[in-house]
Amino acid sequence: MASTYTTNTGIEKPATGEQSGTWGDTTNTNFDIIDRLTHGVGTISLSGTTHTLTTSDGALSEGQFTALVLGGSPSGTNTITISPNDQTKLFIVKNGSGQDAIFTQGSGGNVTVSNGTSKIIVADGAGSGAEVVDITNTIDIAGVVNATTFSIDGTEVTDTATELNKLDGLTATTAELNFVDGVTSNIQTQIDAKQDTITGAASTIATTDLTASRAVIANASGKVAVSDVTSTELGYLDGVTSNVQTQLDAKQATLTGATSTVTENNLTADRAMITTGAGKVGVSAVTATELGYLDGATSNIQSQINALSGASSPTIQVFESSGTWTKPTDCVKVKVTVVGGGGGGAGATEGNVGSGGGGGGTAIEYIDVSSVSSAVVTVGSGGDGGHGGGTPTRSGATGGTSSFGAYCSATGGSGASAGTSSGGAGGVGSGGDLNIGGSGGGAGVVEDARSECGGTGGSSTMGGGGQGPRTTNGAATGGAGRSYGGGGGGAQGGASGYGSADGGDGADGVVIVEEYYG
């Protein structure tokens, strides 16, 4: 049969007939456990914030000591768990670890042993609900207690026994004893030094109150008394820096000089004040509102007005060929209009007609040039008209793109294709505040073998394209674009034997810069 162990301390009890020849070792261990239980003082080294105080069956362990001296270097309040939780324990604890220690065994109550204090605690071994109880404060001490020091709730009592015995028979209440709180010397001596009856100047205020909120004076008898001056009136002296009467005497009794006109009557309200012809204070015809218009002025107003009236009127530069725009002095903004070149009209062979070239696109943009000094100007050329003989081609050429720096641009109109198909497409503007497409060229018309008409060139925003000619039998060249960006007109080929004709050239584009000054 196996050994069993005592419930609370783990002392081994060998079964009958067990451990033959070895029971001596078990007995020696049991004696050591009993020695710890009766007189053992165990030093418990704590670390971190937790520690388990274990009682092991049949072996020496920390939980078997009667007295525990807590040491080590815990990092904070240390929770010590008594294990197992079904053993009853009695410990005398001295905590010198530097941190508070909390003893616990289950979910019941715990006991805190503050650093630097000692307590007697009992663990009830009730399992998961076990409780640890402090019995130090419930010990009933009778008879004589001999001690060199005595503390109450951790505070050492420094009075001698003789001094404490003076309280024997004291009947004063706690409130009455508190009346001596703050006394710094012998009370009777202080009382004897006081005056029995108030005399002198204070004799008039020994039994009755003074009139409230009055300035206090010494009366004709040299006693304390109140005056007719109220505390409010006395407060008017606050801030006075010298003799009041002297200051009053120094003041002018009657206002004279420039102020003499404003001593009795008010001035007209809301007017700017001036000095009159007589050198007196007066009002002007300028209202306060009108005077307020000067707020914010930083220099002579008339000079500023004169400078503004001399500002330059807008100027215009028209670029009919590519170049560079240079900003005039004081120019701050420009309005730029760019128009692409017109497309060329198509040429025509005998018995055929050509269509008109497309008009150039337009872009219009307002630009702040306060930080710009110049810009590159590109003017697109008009597209050449197509050749009636077909060399190099009967189709018209596309007009060139016009631009103002990188700000805005407009493409040229497309050249017209040979034949009676629709004319060339109009160009387009881009980058401007307003972008306008050019008109497409008109298609040539063949009415019969003797009556034909070339297509009209597309118009730009500046005007129309070249005319498409119309004759009987004879050949006719298409008209050139009539205004900036206008497309060339398509040609009219003559009847058999009358020959071919060339299409009209598209008009060059243009860049117009309107300059505004600050």
Image (cartoon, rainbow, N blue to C red):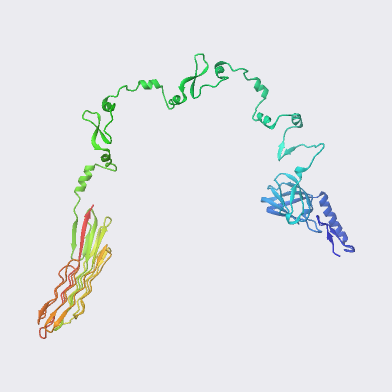
Quadrant of the image for the N terminus?
Answer: bottom right
Left or right relative to 43: residue 459: left
Frontmost residue, 282 versus 11? 282
Horizontal and vertical percent position of residue 344: 18, 74
- In this orientation, does residue 497 appear? yes
- For the point 47% across and 25% down, the residue is 231
Frontmost residue, 118 versus 137? 137
Horizontal and vertical percent position of residue 431: 28, 64
Residue most extreme to the top: 221
- In this orientation, does residue 501 appear? no
Quadrant housing residue 203: top right
Frontmost residue, 229 versus 254? 229
Horizontal and vertical percent position of residue 32: 83, 54
Q: Is residue 135 above or below residue 487?
A: above
- For the point 66% across and 20% down, the residue is 192
Q: Is residue 220 above or below residue 79?
A: above
Frontmost residue, 34 versus 182? 182
Left or right relative to 279: residue 210: right
- For the point 50% across and 24% down, the residue is 212
